[in-house]
Structures are given as C-alpha cells and as structure tokens.
Amino acid sequence: MTKECIIRVENMTKAFGKTIVLQGIHTEICKGDIVAIIGPSGCGKSTFIRTLNLLEQPTEGAIYVDGENIMDKKTDINRIRQKIGMVFQHFNLFPNLTILENIILAPVKTKTMTQADAEKKARELLARVGLEDKADAYPDTLSGGQKQRIAIVRALAMNPEVLLFDEPTSALDPEMVGEVLSLIQELAEDGMTMVIVTHEMGFAKEVANRVMFFDERIIKEEGTPEQIFEAPQSERLKSFLACIK
Amino acid sequence: MKRYLIWIMTVLLLCLTSCGKEVGPSDISGVEELAGKKIGVQIGTTGDIYASDYEKDGSGTVVERYNKGNDAISSLKNGKIDCVIIDEEPAKQYIKRNSDLSILEEEFKLEDYAICVSKEQSKLTEAINGALNELIADGTLQTIIDHYITDGEVEGKAYTSPAGLDYANGELVMATNAAFPPYEYYSNNEIVGIDAEMARAVADKLNMRLVIEDMDFDSIITAVQGGKADIGAAGMTVTEDRLKNIDFTVSYTTAKQVIVVRNGNSGAITSIRDSFYQNFVEDDRYMYLVEGLGNTIVISLVAVLIGIVIGFLVAIVRATHDKTGSMKLLNAICHVYLTVIRGTPTMIQLLIIYYVVFASANISKIAVAALAFGINSGAYVAEIIRGGIMSLDQGQFEGARSLGLTHAQTMRYVILPQTFKNTLPSLANEFIVLIKETAISGYIGLQDLTMAGNIIRSNTYQAFFPLIAVAIVYLAMVMLFSAGVRKLEKNLKKNERQVYD
C-alpha cells in the first residue's frame, strides 16, 4: 500500500547570497509521517522546514503540496499555508490579542470558519491542553510552556494537513519541555502528520517514524529511528551522535 | 503641589521678562538725520521702499522690517529702533495712545492711495473707477474720510448701504491688512476704517456683496494677482514696482509718510488691572481669543487625523516595500513625498498650498490650513510608524503569514495595533509640535489663536497680556493633550495585564 504524499520536494536549492545552504534536496512527506530532522547547528535544517511553507523562498527546484507547485507565482500561497501549520521556537503569539483571539484570528479572517464555530473549536482545543481558563488572558501573562502549547493550538485551529515544528522546545526552561513534548506525542498518536526540527534525540527516537540527518547542505542520512540511532552509517552522523550523548 | 510650584515659577519668569528698561528720546529731528539710524517700517509699504534707499547709501542705516505697523511702534518704544516711517493717519492713532511718541513736523513723503486690481480684470478696474468718481462727486468719500480722521473718538460708521440691493453680481473680495488705523482695523470683531467703508460703498455701486479678507500687507498683491481676492485696499500707494504686477484704480485719497520718534516723555503707565481690562474686556476683545482658539483646535484636530491617515498609508507602503520588495512605484512616490515635505519649511508649504495649489479655488482657509498641516505631519508620522513596524520581531510577521493570513490582514490585525502602541509616545510628541506649528496660520490671514493675540496687540499697543494669554492657552492645550495621551497609554497597557495572576 503506497501512502498518500502531502509534500514533495524536488531538487531544491537554497542560497543566501553566495552562501549555499541547501543543495539539490529530494524528499517526500506522506500522510501520517512523523519526520524528525536532526543535525548540527547551521546545517540548514531550520531553513529546510521554513521552505516548506515558503517563509524562505528556495533559489531553485520545486515544492509540491497536494500536487500543486507552491513556487509557481500563480499559486495562492495563503491558501497553501492554511493547510500547513507551523510552530516556532519563539512561539510568535500576538501580544496585542487575547489567547482566544490569537487562536480564532486566522480561521475567522481567512473565512475558514464562522466566528462561533471558531470559538467553539478554540475552547475545545484549549480544554484539551488544559488551558481553558486562559482564554481571555494575554500571552505576556503565560509561562513559556503554556505559550508554546497555545501556539500549537493556534496552528491546530486551522485543521492543517501537516504541522511543522521548528525547534519547539529550544527556547523553553528545562522543566517546561516535558509538557510541550507530551502534547506533540499525543498529536502523533492521533495520526497527525508532522515534521519536527529538534535537538531532543530521545524524543525523536520515540515519536518519529523517519529521521533525517542534515549535514553538508544535504540530507546526509535518512532512515527509521533504529537505523539512524542504532546503526549510523556515515562518519559525520556517528561523530554527531557521539557529541550529544 | 509640585505642579503649582512649576506654574508659579513660570508666571514669575514671564513677569520678569516683561520688565523693561528706561529708554531716552530718539536723536532725530528731521529727514536729513535719518542716515545712519535704525529705521522701523512695515514690510512692503512705501515707507519700506523709501527707507531701503538709505540702507544702500553706505551710511550704516539699518532698516528693520515688521509685519505690522504696531510691532514697529512697540520696538520704537522699547528702544530697539530710533524711528518708524509710517503713514500719517495710523501714526496719529499711535501717538494718541502713546504719550512718549511724537510725529516729526517735517513730512517724509506725500503719496496717493488707490485700490489694486489684477491686470486681467480691466473691466473691474473700469467699473471701480466709475464708482469711485461718483462717490467723490457726491461727497460720500469725503464723509467717510472725515468720519475717521478726527480729533475725537470714532463712533459708529459713516456709510450705510442703500436699501433694496440684491447683490446680483456676486461677491467682491477685498484683501487688506487690518492693523492700519484709521484705514482698516478691528473694532468689535469687525474690520472697519476708511478703506473698508469706501470699498463697501464701491461694492454697493457695483451691486456686489463686499467680503473683507485680513492678511499680511505683503501678501495682498499676491492674493489679488492669484485671484484669492478681487481687489486690494490697504492704504496702498501706487509705485513703479507695484505697477509691474498689478493695476491701480484712480486715487481715492492722499496721505503723508511721516517719521515717528520717541520724545523723551515717559509713557503712560497703565496699571495691570487697566491693562487687563483693555486687552480682554474692552470691546469684548477676549472674543478674538475664543474664536482664534476655536479655529486652532479645528485645524489641529483635522490635521492630526489627516496626518495619521497619510502617515499610516505611507508607512505601510514603505514597510511593505522594505520587507517584500513589492510596490516599487508607490514606494518611489512616497519617498519623494517624504523628501519634499521634510526638506522644506512648513510655512512655505502652507503658503504654496494656499497661494499656488488652491490659487483660484474658493476653499475655506481653515480647510487649507488643516490640509497643509496634515500633509506636513503625515511625513513625520509615516517615518515614526515605519520605524515601529521595522522594529517589531520578524516572528510576528511569520507567525501570522504561516497561518495563511494575507500581508494586508497581517498588517491590520497583528502588526499595526502593536506598532500604534509602541509608537504612541513619539506620535504624541509629533502632534504636540503640530499643535504649536499651527501658529503660523496667520500667514494666510487665518485668525487662529496667535493671530487673535496679534489683533488685540494691534488694538491696544500692549504686548504683555495678549502674548502671555496666547502662550498660556497653547500651554494648556498641550498639557490637556498630553494628559489624554497618558490616559490612552495607560489603557493600552492595562489591557494586556488585566488577567495577570
């Protein structure tokens, strides 16, 4: 049985000026995939995940989402982004809006849902992450872990086909990492398609079904968590894993 | 308590600055002694033209040019200049109220007064000539002149319009400088005087309704040329230079240019109480301030609104260009706008908008001023807002765009609300500057708060109370505005903390 492909990346290159960060990347993200992306800092893993919803414009190549080339000027990128949720390292909640307003802003303004439906859905999601009492609070009054859980809820409110996580726990105090990771794990168990850039190797091992090791501008090595963590092939991956142990 | 202290200190300081020193008499007894002296004139008058000849002869003569005759007189009293060359009749009015000043026996020049009309309006010139000749023939003009040139107090008016006029020929707009008694001056909130009544009599003959516009003397010819006014009547003498730009009617009266000097007497000392009465209560003069304040408030409010709208639009275009590279043409236009507005004086912009852009349009001065100050302020607001947008965390844009919001939605719901809050102190600062900048509205003859103070000064020949009153009103306005902004700022902050636990 072949899995349904959501995102396909073909021969994608990204350069900042003369510095080439990614070169000739080929890969697919399929429905139900939970892809963990690991690699040394500066290897381009964050840049890669940000090209998937065109926050970074690739220099060459093509990216297909549900069969549409999103680099085509005629493609409505806003419509594509509605299908791809993203969670950032620094949460990026809107401090001028309450938690509830943060969550329903996009569903209502993109006319994906009515105000009433969006609010109902937002409250359900807030209840699910145990923050329903924060609906009318402002982001500045929350802890980092709470903010990141709200950011995840905000992305989920659009009913995305895939969720991108760009180092979701890197900016958190250690005692707050757990609450965010367990929420991501719950989503994984529900079958959510996810791409996660992370430094939490234990988490990657446990949750992901595919692990990509980015290094030297390419996907240096890819495989199941067992293949990557138990039987690394390349010297680079071996020394990387040795370093972080 | 601290506040009261500040107030008391301010008032004391102002009182101190008003203390003058004793000045001796002028060292001038005739025309031949003018060389080498400091001569005061009203800018653009024939006195100015004649005095300028002395300035060029190498004798060290200095000509001080004032916007109003009574400013020149005030400077003479204070010893800043040695004499004032001015028309005889206004001079008589000045010395009547100032016992420390005299007119020299020897006259400076004899000259003819006439009405100026645009060169393109030769039919109007002819019609006015006809009317003037009739008024001279039937003695009406002499009656008006005799009414105002008198040793006693002037009461009421000399001329009443005949009944049954329907003004079928429209309006006749007269430009004047109403600080020139007895030819034109304010009395009971109305411009009266020989020129005003003479012009009304002429307008009635032409079956037109007379409208009088007060402005600086040196703006009158520009206004008539540009069509802002149909005629200019302001004790204006026919000169070669003026004839190059404008036509004159026949002369309606002759006048002398005389020299006013200090005679060594001490000026009448008015008690603070009397002075207050003269400046504010007599003839309901406080009404000038009330009206002026009203105009200043309207201009400031509308200008602030225009400034905010233009500022936000320009800032959005510029920030969008900076972030995405789109809107190249619009960005270029905005760039030109910012360069021109920030690179030229506000006063010049105001004059250009009034005398050039709206030269022939019949548009209210308040609207012109509000527009000019709004356009000016917009440039500064735009850069403040753009700075605010650019200083926001890039993550705010990315967070919103990643959810599928368009650039416009991102701006409207996420970026601009935060920018507004962050830039509020700078914006408030800009608007305080704007409120005070409206003080130059007088340059297009608009009676704003500053102009109101000047009108009172031109009536009472006293500087202290009118100027201090105007200063205090501006101060109060700015303090009120600042308090409002502080409250708004507090509210915006409170919003974010209301559920803090």
Image: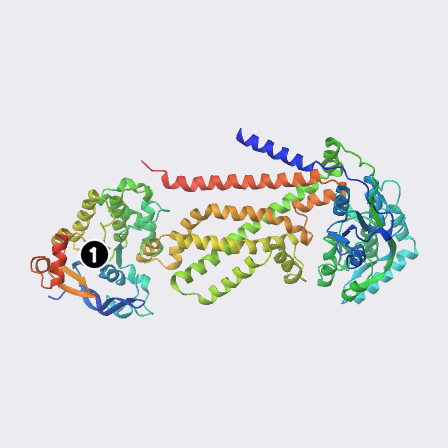
Residue B457: give x, y in percent of width and height. Answer: 73, 42
- 10 Å neighbourhood of mark 1: few (<14), some, or many (≥20)? many
Q: In the rendered image of this protein, does residue B128 appear above or below residue B308?
A: below
Give the residue at mark 1. A197
At 32% from the left and 61% from the top, the residue drawn is A78
- In-front residue for pair B270/B364: B270
At 71% from the left and 62% from the top, the residue drawn is B227
Q: Chain of mark 1?
A: A
Residue B273: give x, y in percent of width and height. Answer: 73, 31
Q: Which residue reaches farthest top?
A: B1
At 72% from the left and 32% from the top, the residue drawn is B272
Q: Which residue reaches farthest front?
A: B59
Q: Is residue B205 left or right of residue A9?
A: right
- In-front residue for pair B342/B185: B342
Residue A210: give x, y in percent of width and height. Answer: 13, 60
The quadrant of the picture occupied by the N terminus of chain A is bottom left
- In-front residue for pair B381/B231: B381
Q: In the rendered image of this protein, does residue B406 appear above or below residue B286?
A: below
Q: Secondary structure at mark 1?
A: strand
